[in-house]
Structures are given as C-alpha cells and as structure tokens.
C-alpha cells in the first residue's frame, strides 16, 4: 500500500480546502434536528451542490465529480478539518444513493440522484418497526399490489431524519404468506402522500432527530419499487453494507474527534494521570488505524474488489471507538462534562456531552453490535449457529 499522495491528489486537496475555507458557515449552523437548523443545513447542501462538492464520487450526470473513493476520503479529511456542517441528507447520499446506483433503473437514477445531491429532497431511513429493530426480517408493514400502485399499511419507528424529511426508503411485506426475509420489497415513499402520517420523536435533549411514520392505505406507485418485488432483502443488505462499511462514517470524522481530544488533554493538564494519558493515546492511534484500514479498503474496491461480511468488523470498530473517545473526554472534563452546549458557561464543553450521548447509539444503529458479532462468527469465522 502506497501511503504517498500523488500530485493530482494534492491538487484536489488544495482545491477542496480553498472552497471550504471560503464557504463553510461561520458561526456554525444550529442543530439539524430542529426545524430552523434542518432548513439551514438543506441550504448548505444546495451550496455544496453548486460548488460540485455534494457527492464527489458520483457520476457527473447525477451531481458528482466522477472522483474515486480515495479522492472522496481526501475530501472528507478537508471537510472535517474545516469544521463544515453535518450532512443532513446522509441517509440519501451515503446509503440510498449507492444502492440506487447498484439496483435502480436508469429512470430512477435520473429521477432521484440529482435531487438527492442538491438537497432538494431529503431522505429518512425507514427500517425499524416496533417489533422489528435489529431483526429486520421480522418486518410486518405491508404493501398490497393494486394495479400500478402499492397500498401501504403499518408503522415504522426511529426513522432517522424523519421529522422533516421529504422521502422515506424502507421494506414492506408484499407477500402476506411469506416468512422472515422472504417476500419483502424495497419501496421509496414520499412522506407527503395521502395516508402517511409523521409523528416526531423527541430525544433526551428535546430535539427531533427521529420520527415514527404511520401508513394507512397509503398509495405509492410501483415505479418506486427498488429491485425486484419480493427481493427487497437483497437490496436492503446492500444498503446495510454501505451503512456499516465505507461511506457512512469516514475516518476523518474520528480523526477530527481525536485531534480535539488531544487538545482537551493538553488544556486540562491530563498528562499527570497515566490512565488518561493511555486512553488519549489509544483514541488517537485507533483513529489513525481506522483511517489506514479505510484507505486500504477503498484501494481494494477501486481495483475491483467488494465489501462483504467484513463490514461488520468495521462497524463494531468505529462505533466502539467513538464511545471510547467521548468517555475519555468526559473523564478529562470532570464535573464540567455535565453541561449541555446551550448552558451559559458551556463554551465548547457541551459539544463533548452531545457527542457522547450520540456515540451511545453507535453500537445500536446500523445493526446492533451483538448482531454484528453473530455475523462475524458465522460468516467470517465459520462458527456454528
């Protein structure tokens, strides 16, 4: 593995850095889990698209630059270095977008991808149901074929970005006699369709990063079916691979957190505590190791490889690394760690508590780490069920 960047990559990095330095909002945008923050983050997505930075590895005709995955990783490094806003459409551009590239028709790609890249249409993820969380094969929401429409009934919950999104992607049981992963179909649903009701879910901090979505004879045209009818499990597993693997959590995210952690360690004089010193060193080393592994994976994919069950290893690593980083920060801060970001005396301390609370979800979303360990045991190690 060649760890040296080519002159072309260095030029690409310089171009990205210059644009971001000139365009990243200052002061930072409000939380994207509020109505105001969501709207401002949508505006930021439009600005990224205008600069042709919305999704650099996508084909030009869909709003990208036709860059490769290594160039995307370089862009992500510059994005986090600049302190740019979180991607409000991450469910679309990082999860559904690659799935559409693989399973969508030409008409679906042309219809959805450009509006996804521009932020004109924001996507919610509709996997979980009240009795089907990590066990997606237990899905009970139904889609009954009636002419050229599906009639949807049932409920989705913990729909990420669902409170303010325009569309939802999810699986529905189209064969009423099917069991488990058979008979499921992957369907794209406009959230303003008649028969669809969205109810926001308040988080611990009162913000609405999620929603539950109810379907009461909602009609969706069959052209919004992605992949084969009854073949939704295969499509969803591809999406889950993108979620657990390369795209959703770029190494730059964790390298930026590790750099902030080192700064905090120096600010509070953590050198006197050998336990905290080791924890900070571990955090920084893990972030660099994750970065190198991701570059290796990107290089393999560029050469024609594929991401398989090893995506489960990746997901466990970054989710547990994120928790460890934030636990270390809270230990360094002591009692000050209890301040939320909007507290009068918080300064930048509240960002650590927000990050910690969010990191606790990492071992749960994208498939719980317990389930991922089962996948590793069975599919990578060949252990019996």
Image: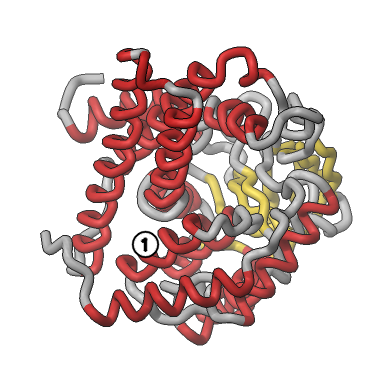
Q: Residue 212 at x, y = what percent?
A: 76, 37
Q: Residue furthest left?
A: 1
> Can see residue 254?
yes
Splitting the image into 4 quarters, where does residue 318 fall? top left
User: Looking at the rendering, in which quadrant would you find the C terminus?
Assistant: top left
The residue lying furthest to the bottom in this view is 61
Decide if residue 154 is in sight here: no
Q: How many numbered marks does the figure carry?
A: 1
Image location (x, y in percent) of residue 310: 26, 41
Please report the residue visible at 45 percent of the width from the left and 70 percent of the height from the top. 101
Nearer to the camera, 367 or 379? 367
Instruction: Name the residue: 28% across, 44% down.
Output: 288
Of residue 280 and residue 64, the one placed in the foreground of this image is 280
Give x and y (percent) for residue 170. 61, 49
The structure residue drawn at horizontal position 32% and vertical position 24%, both measured from the top left corner, is: 374
Residue in the foreground of this view, choosing between 45 and 60 = 45
Q: Mark 1 points at which residue?
A: 73
Callout 1 crowding tier (Cα within 10 Å): few <14, some 14–19, many ≥20: many
**Rendered location of residue 293, percent (x, y):** 23, 48
């Amino acid at each position: 593995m060649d760890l040296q960047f080519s002159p072309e990559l260095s030029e690409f990095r310089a171009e990205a850095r210059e644009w971001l330095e000139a365009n990243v909002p200052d002061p930072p945008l409000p939380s994207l889990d509020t109505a105001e923050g969501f709207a401002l983050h949508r505006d930021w997505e439009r600005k990224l698209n205008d600069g042709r930075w919305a999704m650099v590895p996508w084909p030009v005709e869909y709003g990208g630059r036709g860059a490769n995955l290594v160039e995307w990783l370089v862009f992500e490094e510059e994005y986090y270095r600049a302190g740019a806003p979180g991607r409000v459409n991450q469910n679309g551009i990082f999860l559904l977008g690659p799935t559409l590239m693989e399973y969508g028709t030409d008409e679906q790609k042309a219809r959805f991808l450009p509006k996804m890249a521009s932020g004109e249409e924001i996507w919610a993820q509709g996997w979980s149901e009240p009795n089907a969380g990590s066990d997606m094969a237990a899905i009970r929401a139904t889609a009954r074929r009636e002419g050229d429409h599906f009639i949807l009934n049932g409920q989705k919950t913990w729909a990420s970005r669902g409170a303010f999104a325009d569309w939802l992607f999810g699986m529905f049981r189209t064969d009423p006699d099917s069991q488990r992963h058979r008979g499921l179909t992957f369907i794209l649903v406009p959230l303003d369709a008649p028969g669809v009701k969205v109810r926001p879910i308040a988080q611990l901090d009162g913000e609405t990063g999620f929603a539950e979505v109810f379907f009461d004879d909602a009609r969706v045209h069959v052209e919004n079916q992605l992949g084969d009818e009854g073949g939704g499990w295969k499509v969803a597993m591809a999406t889950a691979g993108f979620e657990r693997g390369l795209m959703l959590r770029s190494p730059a995210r964790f390298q930026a957190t590790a750099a902030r952690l080192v700064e905090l360690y120096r600010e509070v004089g953590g050198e006197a505590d050998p336990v905290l010193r080791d924890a900070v060193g571990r955090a920084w080393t893990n972030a660099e190791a994750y970065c190198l592994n991701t570059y290796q994976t990107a290089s393999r994919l560029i050469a024609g490889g594929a991401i398989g069950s090893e995506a489960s290893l990746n997901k466990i690593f970054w989710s547990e690394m994120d928790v460890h980083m934030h636990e270390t920060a809270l230990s360094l801060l002591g009692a000050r760690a209890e301040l939320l970001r909007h507290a009068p005396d918080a300064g930048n301390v509240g960002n650590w508590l927000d990050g910690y609370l969010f990191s606790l979800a990492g071992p749960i979303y994208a498939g719980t780490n317990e389930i991922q360990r089962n996948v590793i045991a069975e599919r990578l190690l060949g252990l019996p069920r």
